[in-house]
Image (cartoon, rainbow, N blue to C red):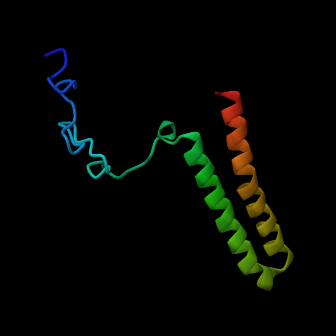
Amino acid sequence: MGGNDADGTGAGGSDADGSGTEGNNANGGDREPGPVAPEEIGPAGAMIAVAFTGSVIAFAGFGLLVLLGEVGLVLVAVGLLAVLASPAAYFRYRQLYR
């Protein structure tokens, strides 16, 4: 049936608590866990993921700095580069695709 219901939503709209017949809860509780498609991650999410990965690499390099010396120092530098470059890449993306 086409058109809207009395509350302005279609037949598959949402209830007052944010959950509708499709199971689209406001808290995402009905979503099945599984792989995330690239189009589901926005630029801000990608920036957070890259910055987090860079910080993990930097911390691992800092831990290995005592044991391996220069190898740990290189990992720290690469991790910090990723952490600092991800916000710059995000702002550049926003500037180009606004």
Residue sitting at 34 percent across and 52 percent down?
A: 33
Q: Quadrant of residue 79?
A: bottom right
Lateral position of residue 31 relative to residue 13, left or right: right
- In percent of width and height, residue 53 lies at 63, 60
Residue sitting at 74 percent across and 76 percent down?
A: 62
Q: Quadrant of residue 16?
A: top left
Furthest residue toward right: 70
Q: Is residue 11 above or below residue 32?
A: above
Residue sitting at 69 percent across and 73 percent down?
A: 60
- Work out which quarter of the rendered image holds the C terminus and state it: top right
- Work out which quarter of the rendered image holds the N terminus and state it: top left
- In percent of width and height, residue 28 lies at 32, 49
Q: Is residue 94 above or below residue 89?
A: above
Furthest residue toward bottom: 66
Furthest residue toward front: 7
- In percent of width and height, residue 83 lies at 71, 57
- Along the line of sight, the residue nearer the viewer: 96 or 57: 96
Number of numbered discs overlaid on the protein picture: 0
Residue sitting at 27 percent across and 41 percent down?
A: 24
Lateral position of residue 33 relative to residue 82, left or right: left
Q: Quadrant of residue 65?
A: bottom right
Q: Is residue 39 above or below residue 77?
A: above
- In percent of width and height, residue 59 lies at 69, 73
Q: Is residue 26 above or below residue 1?
A: below
Lateral position of residue 78 relative to residue 93, left or right: right
